[in-house]
Amino acid sequence: MRIVSLSCASWVVVTITALSLTAWTSRVAAQDKPAAAKLAAGGSAVVRGKYLVTVIGCGECHTPLKMGANGPEFDEARMLSGHPGTLKLPPPPTPVGAWAGFFPMEGAAFAGPWGISYPANLTSDKETGLGTWTEQQFMDTIRTGRRQGRGRELLPPMPWRAFRNLTDADLRAVFAYLRSIPAVSNKVPDPVIPAAPTGK
Ligand code: HEC
């Protein structure tokens, strides 16, 4: 009898807990709905994409620098347009001791054991940027570390191994934002890849 009344009591507790949990979840869901609906709309995806691109710091590599009053600063007029094609750099110095790589004062180029890589033009310019890329090709690039998911492997220091963990919704938002910024015509040079060792 005791056992029965005890299990009865626990059943009541479980039921009440379940009921209040359900009520709580649906309250939260109700509160979340407008935000979710807003995010689903194109405009808000751009807002989310801008937030992601800003906090992840895509511009640290993909936006050229210019000299400001307090030293080098982002050149907003060329935001995310990659290494300036007009900038002619001398060959990088030879690494000494533990030093493996170099980058120039203007930013947006990296020399290391992989050769020389130039951050790409991420704006929607059709000839020199991502203008002809589809959202899927962009997502495949970030997920596989290969251009459009099937081209050559992306060179360091593009941190695609970290970025591939972004959710589909976030990657879509990043792409939507990149589509929304001014297109900049800037042909980024091809990377310089050291010749493969012979006898390979
Ligand atoms: C630490 C520097 C760095 C950061 C930060 C960075 N990138 Fe890159 N990214 C590069 C470099 C360098 C390349 C060129 C690699 C190559 O040529 O293989 C590149 C290439 C790319 C490409 C390939 C484009 C093409 O035409 O091949 C895409 C897309 C891209 N980056 C998107 C992004 C996005 C989006 C972010 C931020 C979420 C980002 N990158 C942050 C350095 C960086």
Image: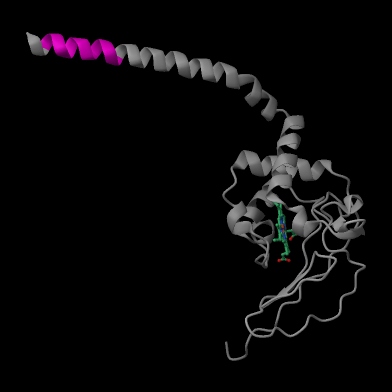
Which residue is painted at 73% across and 31% down in the image?
Answer: 44
Question: Where is residue 173, by image quadrant?
Answer: top right
Image quarter for ligand 1: bottom right
**Above or below — where is 112 with respect to 106?**
below
Tell me residue 171's x, y (percent).
66, 44
Which residue is painted at 81% across and 71% down in the image?
Answer: 104
Quadrant of the frame with the N terminus: top left
Tell me residue 133's x, y (percent).
76, 51
Q: Is residue 102 visible?
A: yes
On whether residue 163 falls in the magenta region, the answer is: no
Horizontal side, residue 78 vs residue 140: left or right: right
Towards the viewer: 21 or 179: 21
Q: Residue furthest front?
A: 70
Quadrant of the frame with the C terminus: bottom right
Please state the total of marks drawn on the protein image: 0
Horizontal side, residue 199 vs residue 82: left or right: left
On whether residue 6 falls in the magenta region, the answer is: yes
